[in-house]
Image: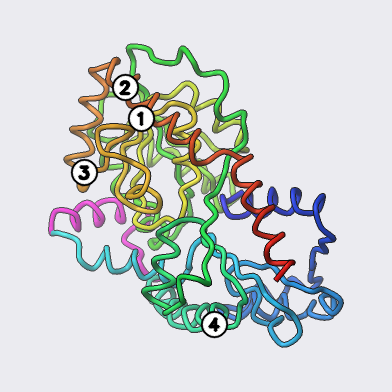
Amino acid sequence: MTGALLMNRDIYQFLKNKIDIHPIIPKNEEYLNIRNIGTILYYFSAVDQAEDCDFIWGTSIATLGFFNQNKVIQHFHGVDSIGRQVVLDNYKSQSESENKVTQKWQKILLNNNDSNLEEVKRDIAISGEIEKICCQKAIVIIAVSPLVKKQLIGDFGVSSEKIKVILNGISDYWFENHDSKFVDDAKVIFVTRVSNSFYNLLEKGQDRAYEILSQLDNQKKIYSHLSTSNPREINEYKKVVENNTGAQIIIGKNREQLAREYRAGDIYLGTSRTEACQLTLIEAMACRMCPVTYSVGIVSDYIKNGINGFVVKSIKEAVHVIEKLSKDKKLRETIGNNAYFTAKENFTYDRMLDEYSEFISNVIKG
């Protein structure tokens, strides 16, 4: 389950105990097979379910079909078109050495396939226009991070007053049962989503991460969600990555399993080229892991370099920082504890739900 789906589920469960909330559930899933406009058609097919609703609360472009008859609350867990363009711009502006790394892992993992980038470029143009319309027509917009708010203002021209930032929150169990975790052997964990897609490789920074892991002598784990259930594809991917990185791949099943891995881990490696609110980073911080991450999503607002994590700009720098942390248990403990308190102060479940409760009360009052 993606972070956005997880948050949507939890917000719904919370709000249904506070207000009369009605889930809109389209029946014709065949629409979802249509590129670009499939999501719009899918929800538009259920527009009659919203006739008696005062407000529609939806994410991304799913709300487009409801503006004629409802007041819409637009929720952005990330702005898809902007985030994708950031990935492509980053890839296009890479240094020669960075390109060599990308090409190396593109060849190892995908046999040099990059065919889906042209589709991504077309999707950006279409979804960007639709997202702009949704922003213009919504009565209010929720952004899950200061970065998303900044993107909406800068790229779509949305007024600051129309946007409410509500940070994601995580359950209490992430903050529990890891008080004596710091040991001599430093374990590095990288969390990703795997598919046979060059764009996905770029977006999640798998080329960066696997290159970094391949240069480390630490105990290394890759916690992976897979977009395929084909046992042959899973086994082939595991074999290739493990042979080339020396890391152990764990096929993710649920958030509780990830929490167990985090509690036994020491260093969180973040290499994505785009993020909105990085739930995996927040969860790692709550488990007193030391973040070593590129500056995406919430990093620039909540990670203070050398205090509660390390912000890196290159593979070489990431390797150096991880090696430094690996040799210094006291430093890992200091950084990990500071990361924990940052998460506890800003990203708790109760804080998030209190903000949503206040928000929805204000919207209803008008």
Q: Determine the secondary structure under disc 2.
A: helix
Report the residue marked by disc 1: 290
Drawn side of residue 351 relative to residue 237, left or right: right
Label 1 near label 2: C-beta < 8 Å? yes
Which label number is shown at residue 315?
3
Overall secondary structure of the magenta stretch?
Answer: helix
Residue at screen point 66% across, 68% down: 58
Measure how far apart labels 3 and 1 are at the Cα level.
Answer: 17 Å
**Image coords of residue 222 (percent x, y):** 43, 36
Q: Amino acid at mark 4?
A: Gln
273 within the magenta span: no
* Horizontal arrangement in the rendering, residue 54 relative to residue 184 (left or right): right
SS category of the residue bearing label 4: helix
Which range of residues does the magenta coloring cover?
96-116
Q: Nearer the viewer, mark 4 or mark 2?
A: 4
Q: CA distance from mark 4 to mark 2?
A: 46 Å
**Residue drawn at point x = 76 percent, y = 85 percent:** 69
Q: Quadrant of the C terminus?
A: bottom right
The residue wearing badge 2 is 332
| N-terminal label among 3 and 1 | 1
- Label 3 and label 2: CA atoms lie apart by 20 Å
Label located before the other in sequence (3 or 2):
3
In space, the residues marked 2 and 1 are separated at their CA atoms by: 6 Å
Q: Secondary structure at mark 3?
A: helix
Disc 3 residue type (three-letter) = Ile
| Upstream in sequence: badge 2 or badge 1 | 1
Q: Position of residue 70 (x, y in %)?
A: 74, 80
Residue drawn at point x = 62 percent, y = 36 percent: 171
| Residue type, label 2 | Arg
| Residue under label 4 | 136
270 and 296: which is toward the camera = 296
Along the viewing direction, whichever of 317 and 309 lies nearer the viewer: 309
